[in-house]
Amino acid sequence: MVTALTDETDYRQILREAGLRVTPQRASIITILSEADDHPNVEDLYEKTRALDDTVSVATVYRTMSVLENAGLVRKLVLDDAPARYEMMPQTDHDHLVDLDSGDLVEIPGTEIAELMSRVASELGYEIVSHHTVIRARKI
Amino acid sequence: MVTALTDETDYRQILREAGLRVTPQRASIITILSEADDHPNVEDLYEKTRALDDTVSVATVYRTMSVLENAGLVRKLVLDDAPARYEMMPQTDHDHLVDLDSGDLVEIPGTEIAELMSRVASELGYEIVSHHTVIRARKI
DNA sequence: TTGACTTTTGCGACTTATTCGCATTTACAT
DNA sequence: ATGTAAATGCGAATAAGTCGCAAAAGTCAA
C-alpha cells in the first residue's frame, strides 16, 4: 500500500491537532478500517483488530469510532435494522445503497446527491453538518 | 377534521387488502399518528394513544408501526442517536433535516431528492424500495 | 530523561430501544 | 353463531451502545 505512510502521518497529525492522543489501539483500529474494502461494523472491526493487536477492547472500538467521527476522519453509516457501519472518510464523496436481497452496501459514486442536499438545506437557511442517505433497493 | 373519515376508510381498506385486521388498537394508534404534526416516537405515540384507549400496550405500538410501515401507510425515520420517529406516509413527498441546535425535525419539501435517488439507483441497475435521507444541519 | 498531568484504556456493569414467547382474546369469513 | 388464524398484553429477553472506575500510558515542559 503506497499511500499507507502518508495516510498514517495524516491521521496522526489530525488527531494531535485535535488535542487527541495517538495510541496503539487507535493506530491498529485505523489500520484495519483503512484496509477494509467493505463497511465494517464494530464487531467486525473488533475481531479483525484483535488479530493484529490483542490489547483492544470493544469499548475502545466504540470510543475510537466516535472520536474519529468527530475528528472528521471516519464516516458512520446508520442503517435501519443493523448495527452502524463505518468507513474512512472518503476523498471521493459518495452515498450508499443497501441491496435488500444480498444485504450488500453498494457505494453510489458522484457528488450529485451531496450537492443537492447542500442546495436544499441552504434554501431553508441551514448549513449542512452531515448528511446521511441510505437507499434501500433491489436489483432490477 | 374533514378528511378524517376518508383517511379512516382508506387505512381500513388498505389493511384489509393486505390481509391484516382492523383492530381498535390499530385504529387508535393511527388516529393519534394522523393528528400529530410533529414526528412522534413510540413513546410519544404510546402515551398519547393511552389517553384515548387504555388497552394499548407499548409492544402493540411497536408492532403496529412495523405493520403499517410494511403496508406502506407509515414512514419510519431512523435517526442516529434517538429512537425512531414516525409519520403517516405523506402525499407530498419530502425528506428531513435535523436541526442540531434545537433537535427539531424539519421537513424538506419537494420531490427533487426522491427523483435524484431514483435516477441514481436505476443507473446502478437498482429499483428503489425506500430511501432515507436525513440531513443534520445548523441554522446559518 | 524524568516527572507531572491528563487522556485513554479494559473491564464489567448498565442503559435503552426494540423484539419475543406465550397464554388469552378477538376480528372476520363462513 | 362458530372456527380459526391473527393480534394482543405482559413481562422477560436481546442487542447495540454507553459509563464508572481504577490502572496504564501518551505528551509536554523542564
Image (cartoon, coloured by chain):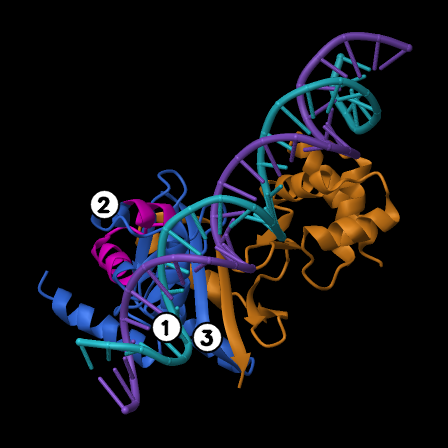
Chain colours: A blue, B orange, C cyan, D purple
Which amino acid, by three-letter code, is at mark 1? Ala
Q: Quadrant of residue A32?
A: bottom left
Q: Nearer the viewer, residue A44 or C10?
A: C10
Whole-percent x and y of residue B29? 76, 46
Q: Nearer the viewer, residue A58 or B62?
A: A58
Instruction: Please give the residue where the numbered disc 2 appears in the rendered image.
Output: A51
Whole-percent x and y of residue B95? 55, 64
Asked whether, in this view, residue B140 is left or right of residue B17, the answer is: left
Which amino acid, by three-letter code, is at mark 2? Ala
Which amino acid, by three-letter code, is at mark 3? Val
Q: Secondary structure at mark 2?
A: helix
Q: Residue at x 64, y 33 (%)?
A: B18
Whole-percent x and y of residue B81? 54, 60
Query: Disc 2 or disc 3, which is closer to the eye?
Result: 2
| Discs 1, 2: same chain | yes
Mark 1–mark 2 distance (CA, rounded to whole Å) = 26 Å
Q: Residue at x 45, y 78 (%)?
A: A119
Q: How many marks?
A: 3
Q: Are marks 1 and 2 in contact (CB under 8 Å)?
A: no
Start-end of magenta stretch = A26-47
Mark 2–mark 3 distance (CA, rounded to whole Å) = 35 Å
Instruction: Please give the residue where the numbered disc 1 appears in the rendered image.
Output: A71
Q: Residue at x 65, y 43 (%)?
A: B68
Q: Name above or below for residue A4 compared with residue B62.
A: below
Q: Quadrant of residue B93?
A: bottom right
Could you tell me which chain the residue with mark 1 belongs to? A
Neighbor class of circle 1 (other Cα within 10 Å; few <14, some 14-19, many 20+) is some
Could you tell me which chain the residue with mark 3 belongs to? A
Instruction: Please give the residue where the numbered disc 3 appears in the rendered image.
Output: A129
